[in-house]
Amino acid sequence: MDLFTNLAFGFDHALTMSNLMYCAIGCVVGTLIGLLPGLGPLSTISLLLPLTYSIPTDGSLIMLAGIYYGAQYGDSVSAITMKIPHASSIVACIDGYQMNLNGKTGLALFTAGISSFIGGTIAILVLATLSPLLGEVGLMFGPADYCALMLLGFFCVSFVTTGSMLNGLAMTLIGVLLGLVGTDVNSGQMRFTMNLPFLMDGIGLISIALGCFGIAEIVKNLDSHEERTPFSGTIKLMPTWPEFKRIMPSALRGSVIGSFLGILPGGGPVIAQFAAYAAEKRFSKYKDEIGHGAIEGVAGQAAADEAAARTSFIPLMSIGIPENAVMALMMAAFIVKGVQPGPNMIATHPDIFWGLVASMWIGNCFLVILNVPLVRYWLSVFKIPFSVLFPSILFFCCVGTFSINNSLDDVYITATFGAIGYIFMRFGLEAAPLMLGFILGPMLEEYFRRALLLSRGSFYTFVSRPISGSLLALIAVFIIWQLISFYLGLRKQKAAQALSAA
């Protein structure tokens, strides 16, 4: 009964005219960004972070959340119609684009839209049910436990986002070091500032986000010489009853898979779409058609994609640990507005928490209205010249950065990190672990000092406490598993070389 009472409380806040407007804006902007090649929710949220200073707390968080899960469906549209995917819509290119070639573009888009609605609805129920429970568990954590949990998050996210634990940990360490630039809170001493006065307060969170994600992504796309042509196919949306019956089981399976994988550290839409597609190839009655334009191949991945986008908020709002790069930026938005995600968030900011949960279902309804009957109009976005689009984004990026402190130094820092982020992309290094390390690094330092202070300088506290000891053991198992996998890979490579030489 408490669940329905809390949801009713959330709808009271989410159904105000201002919050409805911000939710609609987020869904529209997210859909537009999802349609545009090269720009995803990660770079968009980083570009719009400066707006959170002038928008009310609940409205800004609702808008940014709407951009995130709105972009997930927009990604599917560009992948299905033009085979131009983002990270969260790679699988949609397989059967979705094949359906487009077979003259079933409208059916593929309808399948993606209704499956996203189903996945989002189920995930919202999971979010509303599990977040308070995990929040109660989070209250059992002490400083040493939080240190171990953050280290586990570093290892998980570093491996999943880059595919190489060494590269991921190196990027995370760079982020931690960047987070330590400025004035030490305890001693008041400046550190890593290179005697530059404007670094006394540290590097701005938004400058790194805008540079490494927004500007770097734009420069990467400008550096690409790939030609993109506007979509010119036909759109007929409504499926037949037999086709609709094929959509539902796959959408439900994908919703369950996405809801579960969205909770796990390092999970999210990218992993969920592949897992849902693999499940369809294993359990679908029409598994022989998958890969050749099957409805199930679109429905499962779309539902998993949207469900994982919603449940990704659970570890962020329950225990204060972002599980992927987008959630790290969302955490930055929370912190900018003076809201600390974690176990106490539900108790201290119930209006924001339950209002955000309720707004997700409202956004779900907005997305169905926007993306099913109006999809043929959204496709006209592909006709915007990139020579107009990208310079405009860069201009507003610089204006937004400057408006925070009215300082050109912030613009220079943002441009510097834009160049650094582009270099990372050219070397195949993702900036997501860096962002995670930058946000959690100062928190890790604070909890580490607090744990040593309470234990009077004894490191034994990190292994003596059940929670931290278990998490550190899990990290050790994770490292050993990676080393064994690396060793077996080397042996397999040497065996292949010996066989080829013979």
Image (cartoon, rainbow, N blue to C red):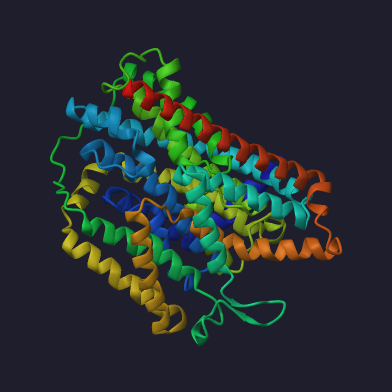
Q: Residue furthest right?
A: 456
Q: Position of residue 379 (x, y in %)?
A: 21, 46
What residue do we see at 37% from left, 52% from top? 30
Q: Nearer the viewer, residue 159 or 82?
A: 159
Using the rendered view, name the quadrant where residue 208 is placed.
Answer: bottom left
What residue do we see at 42% from left, 29% from top? 494
Q: Nearer the viewer, residue 229 or 2?
A: 229
Q: Position of residue 118 (x, y in %)?
A: 46, 33
Q: Nearer the viewer, residue 255 or 222?
A: 222
Q: Residue furthest front?
A: 502
- Is any atom of residue 58 visible in this view? no
Q: Is residue 184 left or right of residue 207?
A: right
What residue do we see at 41% from left, 36% from top? 116
Q: Nearer the viewer, residue 267 or 27?
A: 267
What residue do we see at 47% from left, 31% from top? 489
- Is any atom of residue 236 visible in this view? yes
Q: Position of residue 322 (x, y in %)?
A: 57, 52
Q: Count of labels shown?
A: 0
Q: Quadrant of the N terminus?
A: top right
Q: Is residue 378 above or below residue 60?
A: above
Using the rendered view, name the quadrant where residue 348 is placed.
Answer: bottom right
Using the rendered view, name the quadrant where residue 441 is placed.
Answer: bottom right
Q: Is residue 501 above or below residue 65?
A: above
Q: Quadrant of the C terminus?
A: top left
Q: Is residue 240 left or right of residue 299?
A: left
Q: Position of residue 332 (x, y in %)?
A: 53, 63
